[in-house]
Amino acid sequence: MSRHSKQKVVVDNTSSVGNITQIVRFGVPTALVLSVLAIAVAIVSGYDLRTLFEGAEQVQPTISTSSDVGGSAQELSEAFAIELMYDEVEALNSRVVFAAPFRQSGLEKYIVLAETTLDDIATHGQPAVIDGAIFAQTDGVWQIVFEEKEVTTLGAFGIAFTESEELVQIGPDKYGVLLRWKGGNQGQFIEQAILITEVQGHLKEVLYIVIGEENLGTCGEGLEECWHYSSELEFVPGENPVYYDLQVATVGSRLVSGTVVPLWETKTYIFAGLEYTLSE
């Protein structure tokens, strides 16, 4: 099935009622409809599509939102999103890691991030490849309006391992996904923030900064002095009419030239060109 034909499929592709409606719309006889439905039920009973998303605890099996378009609630399933974003082979190694609805310019939209493991046996040094797509709903049908492969890479063993994922408003009519990731090595840990949004028709990573560090695995009695810091992020209106400024408030302590010193600072990042940069 081509990408073009997939985009015509009615939303909630996992619904038997939705499938019957779709087939009848194209004029297939009722007897054939019932036969196809019986075969579909047999296939589904023998193969659980949810196995494609094992370990994706942060996302519910069905993504849903209420839509003003058409006057009724519509659903966008993970299986349907993966079907539109990947071919059949890629879909076997891909799963949704984040999805959220939002309303922009009067349209109901969904942003979906998915991770893909490139190799069957992933190593510690191999991150997950994060792809993304934005869906828009028109007349009750979800279609991809923006799609991007390899938006960023994140995590290890081919899995993103994000600490949290959050839909954030980054402008008066602009939204993005804020990912927090934490990694460690030899008792020291680092936390990073990654922001993904649509820029000039492409989904892009527009921010990748360190927001926390600690040495709690290598400090204490008889060891080096403990230190750690963490940050709070807040988007606030600034001079840019499209993108808010980002304020990063950091507190704690850190190691400077072998000495642990207090840390209390606020940095401002502004959107310039295609990404957020530190304001001078």
Image (cartoon, helix red, strand yellow):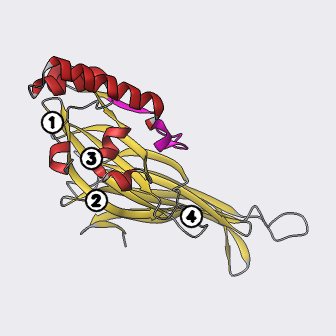
Q: Nearer the viewer, mark 1 or mark 3?
A: 3
Mark 2 is surrounded, within 10 Å at the Cα level, by few (under 14), some (14 to 19) or many (20 or more) other residues, namely some
Please provide the residue range marked out in magenta: 50-64
**Magenta-span inclusion, residue 61:** yes
Label 3 or label 2, whichever lies nearer to me, is 3
Kindly indicate whether the residue at mark 2 contacts the one at mark 1 (C-beta within 8 angstroms): no
Sequence-earlier tag: 2 or 4:
4
For the residues labelled 1 and 4, say whether their Cβ atoms are less than 8 Å apart.
no
- Asked if residue 184 lies in the magenta stretch, the reply is no
Residue picked out by circle 4: 122
> Residue at position x 26%, y 20% from top?
17
Q: CA distance from mark 1 to mark 2?
A: 23 Å
The residue indicated by pointer 1 is: 106
Q: Which residue is mark 2?
A: 148
Which of pointers 4 and 3 lies earlier in the amino acid sequence? 3
For label 1, the SS is loop
* Tag 3 secondary structure: helix
> x and y percent of residue 21 in the render?
18, 22
Looking at the rendered structure, the kind of residue marked 4 is Ala
Amino acid of disc 3? Leu
Query: Disc 1 or 3, which lies upstream in sequence?
Result: 3
Q: Closer to the N terminus: mark 1 or mark 2? A: 1
**In this rendering, is residue 175 above or below 28?**
below
User: In the rendered image of this protein, does residue 279 appear above or below residue 171?
Assistant: below
Q: Nearer the viewer, mark 1 or mark 4?
A: 4
For mark 3, what is the residue? 84
90 vs 116, nearest the viewer: 90
Label 1 vs label 3: CA separation?
23 Å
